[in-house]
Structure formats: C-alpha cells, structure tokens
Amino acid sequence: MSPEATSGLHTTGKSHLTRAVPLVLLVGLQLICALILGYDLARSVFGITAQPISWRVRELLEIAAVLGMLAGALTAALLISRFRRRATDAEQRLANVSAAFVELVESRFAGWGLTKAETDVAWFALKGVPIAQIAALRNTSEGTVKAQSNAIYRKAGVSSRAELMSLFLDDMLSAHDSQTP
C-alpha cells in the first residue's frame, strides 16, 4: 500500500475517533440522567429509604436529567439528519460513477467497432455471465456466443474475458491515479 494511502487511512481513523468523543460523552450524560430519574422512581415504587435531600436539590437534579435527555434526543435527531444527507450524497456519487463507467464502456465498445450483438455479449461478459447463460438469454447457440466473444477479444486487443475486464479496471485505476496528488 502506498504511503499516501496509508496516511489517508490513518487520518480518516483519527478523524472518526475525534468525532466519536463528544458522542460518547453525550451517551454517558444520558446514562447518568437515566440513573438519576430511575433511582428516584425506584425509591418511590419500592419504598427505598435513603438520606433525604432537599426538594430544591432534588428538583435541580431532575431538571438537569431531563435537560440531558433532551440534549441527547436533539443530538440524535441532528445525527440522523446528517447520516441521511450523507447516504443521499453517497447514493448520488455512486449513480454518477455508475453512469461514468457505462459511458466509458460504451465509448470503448464504439471505438472497437463492436456490432449490436457483440455489444450485448460484451456487456454480459463484463457482468460475469457464463457463455451458456448468455446463449440462453440471447436465444443463440453457445458456439455463436463463443465466436462473438472471440471477435470482441480480437477487436479489444485481448485474449480472454479476464483481460477484457482488466482493461476497464485499468482505466478506473489510472483515472484515480491521475487525481491523486
């Protein structure tokens, strides 16, 4: 793994840890609040006697507990909103990448001068569909699919399905390498 990739992973991990600390503290605060409210409730229900505290202190503790629980609920709502926004952004990026990949593949197929039938077979091949299944899906013989596959490989300058797939993988990796500083 390259030093850039390693440092990127390390930075990302540290960033996640830094963001997690306030959440852990908030969860701890909520647990304390729940204990305060739960203890008070348990004392009332089970008749547990303890050293009495003044009503003022008791009410301040209960108010603090309720405020802590509200802060937790508000934070949870904000996080849910943020995570939904991130999920939507990720889905959009995935759709963009998928569209760019389809455009790349179609451009390559056109550049190689594939026929309509060869284009169909090439798409199935890229998806990993076995020759027998391609033949069944296209309502042709396996021999026809093999002949079309060989024509595709010849036009692409490769000798196998794996090499055909690697052409597109290489394109994606070289695009990534050109964007990396």
Image (cartoon, helix red, strand yellow):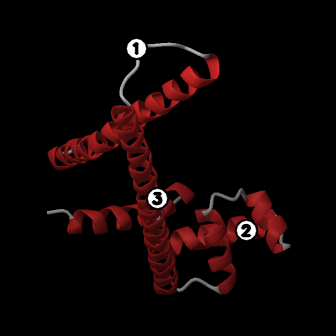
Q: Is residue 66 above or below residue 103?
A: above
Q: In this view, does 72 lie above or below 45?
A: below
Kindly identify the amino acid type of the residue bearing the numbered disc 1. Gln
Dot 2 lies on which element? helix
Q: In terms of sequence position, does the residue under pointer 1 or pointer 3 come before the other? A: 1
Q: Nearer the viewer, mark 2 or mark 1?
A: 1
Dot 1 lies on which element? loop
> Which residue: 50% across, 24% down?
39
Alpha carbon distance from label 2 to label 3: 55 Å
Alpha carbon distance from label 1 to label 3: 38 Å
Q: Which of marks 1 and 3 is in front?
A: 1
> Which residue: 51% across, 86% down?
110
The residue that disc 2 covers is 145
Q: Which of 155 and 170 is in front in this view?
A: 170
Q: Which of 37 and 176 is in front in this view?
A: 37
Q: Which of 47 and 100 is in front in this view?
A: 47
Q: Nearer the viewer, mark 2 or mark 3?
A: 3
Q: Is residue 25 above or below residue 105?
A: above
Q: Position of residue 81 (x, y in %)?
A: 45, 64
Q: Where is residue 1 in the image (x, y as percent from the top left)?
A: 24, 42
Q: Mark 3 packing: few (<14 Cα in 10 Å), some, or many (20+)?
A: few
Residue 51, label in figure? 1
Q: Nearer the viewer, residue 10 or 23?
A: 23
Alpha carbon distance from label 2 to label 1: 86 Å
Q: In terms of sequence position, does the residue under pointer 2 or pointer 1 come before the other? A: 1
Kindly identify the amino acid type of the residue bearing the numbered disc 2. Val
The residue that disc 3 covers is 77
Q: Is residue 64 left or right of residue 91?
A: left
Q: In this view, does 176 lie to the left or right of 164?
A: left
